[in-house]
Image (cartoon, rainbow, N blue to C red):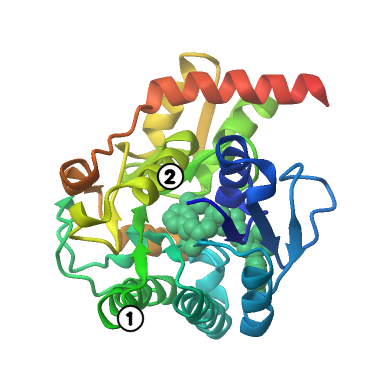
Amino acid sequence: MKRILVTGALGQIGSELTSELRYRYGNDYVIATDIRNDSEGTVGDGPFEVLDVMDGERMFEIAKQYEVDTIIHLAALLSATAENKPLLAWNLNMGGLVNALEVARELNTQFFTPSSIGAFGPTTPKDETPQVTIQRPTTMYGVNKVAGELLCDYYYQRFGVDTRGLRFPGLISYVTPPGGGTTDYAVDIYYKALANQSYRCYLREGTYMDMMYMPDAIEAIIQLMEADGDKLIHRNAYNVTAMSVAPEHFANAIREHIPQFNMTYDVDPVRQSIADSWPNAIDSSIAWEEWGFRAKYDLNSMTGDMFQKLRGKLIQK
Ligand code: NAD
């Protein structure tokens, strides 16, 4: 990775990834793009271009102009939003991905796009979900993610494009609000804990899902992209996780910092049924075996860091 184009750079992952890439590779070498303008200066100094990923020609022009050797494709509609707008999700998630893969093929760049635990479905083994297993998701988001994994494999096998991907769990961060996923509660709960000492959760108690703190997710992307390609067998996409947790575990971890914290439940049937169709705990051992990735943060260390950072943010305001 020397010159990197990021799509969807203003989103939850993109905003933190772009900053970290600029820190490591140099501001001018990371070209941030999004359909929205960066009016708040979210991704700091360095080139920024407005780009709708449905416009493949413009994506090609930008990539060529900046002579990029890596494309990190993040623009997508997330699980809960995709379930509300399935046709839009299909068009954007698949159309944007094909456009980005085509640019990677034409310009011979490295390529990364995230898959998700949403690529699994109700018939997938729920515990210690293997790297290679049944993938029959029942959500539009999941259908997009499975098709995307296969498409990335296809571009590698058929055209030799160096495609790489991760199946991310729910990601938790304090920088940018999440964009309409099923695991968004795990971010919101920290904001509400600080503001109101209470949270009304849209998922039932006992709903286990995998999660990861954003610094680990960013590290996973960079580590995978820097890994020796000869060692990668399961390129698209690696199971990665840091913790398998249910809403009550967040509440308990938060009470270590805010003892009066109170949690109530008001189940949203759409997001509950999506969560119920996903694994409880995935097996991420192949990521360790093939390119040496292991997450650093667990629930308690993440909670401590979240509160410290969020308090800092609130004081600054
Ligand atoms: P997000 O919703 O926070 O950000 C998406 C960004 O894409 C937004 O800034 C949006 O403005 C931009 N965008 C939307 N439509 C666009 C278009 N037509 N052209 C260009 N940009 C457009 O999403 P995120 O959480 O950063 O997720 C990025 C990727 O990671 C997605 O593929 C998502 O499925 C995947 N992922 C995310 C999580 C998570 O918990 N955040 C978990 C698993 C996988």
Q: In screen coordinates, is 2 left or right of 149?
A: right
* Quadrant for the C terminus in the image: top right
Q: Secondary structure at mark 2?
A: helix
Say which residue label 2 marks. Answer: 222
Around disc 1, counting alpha carbons within 10 Å, would you say few (fewer than 14), some (14 to 19), or many (20 or more)?
Answer: few
Residue 23: give its label: none
Q: Please report whichever mark, 1 or 2, sits nearer to the chain's N-terminal start.
A: 1
Please provide percent x and percent y for residue 274.
39, 63
Residue at image location 83% in from the left, 47% down from the top: 40
| 212 is higher (above) or lower (below) than 159 | above
Instruction: Estimate the spatial distance between the alpha carbons at disc 1 and disc 2, rounded to whole Å.
Output: 23 Å
Residue at x 38% of width, y 27% of height: 297
Few, some or many C-alpha atoms within 10 Å of disc 2 (few <14, some 14-19, many ≥20)?
some
Give above or below for 90 relative to 244. below
Would residue 177 be visible to someone looking at this image? yes
Name the residue at 37% across, 57% down: 275
Asked if the residue at label 2 sits under 8 Å from ligand 1, the reply is: no
Q: Is mark 1 within 8 Å of ligand 1?
A: no
Q: Is residue 25 above or below residue 155?
A: above
Tag of residue 159: 1
* Residue type at tag 2: Ile
> Can you give x and y, in whole percent of width and height, for residue 145 in the image?
38, 70
Q: Position of residue 246 (x, y in %)?
A: 35, 40
Q: Residue at x 23, y 38 (%)?
A: 292
Amino acid under disc 1: Phe
Nearer to the camera, 115 or 202:
115
* SS of the residue under disc 1: helix
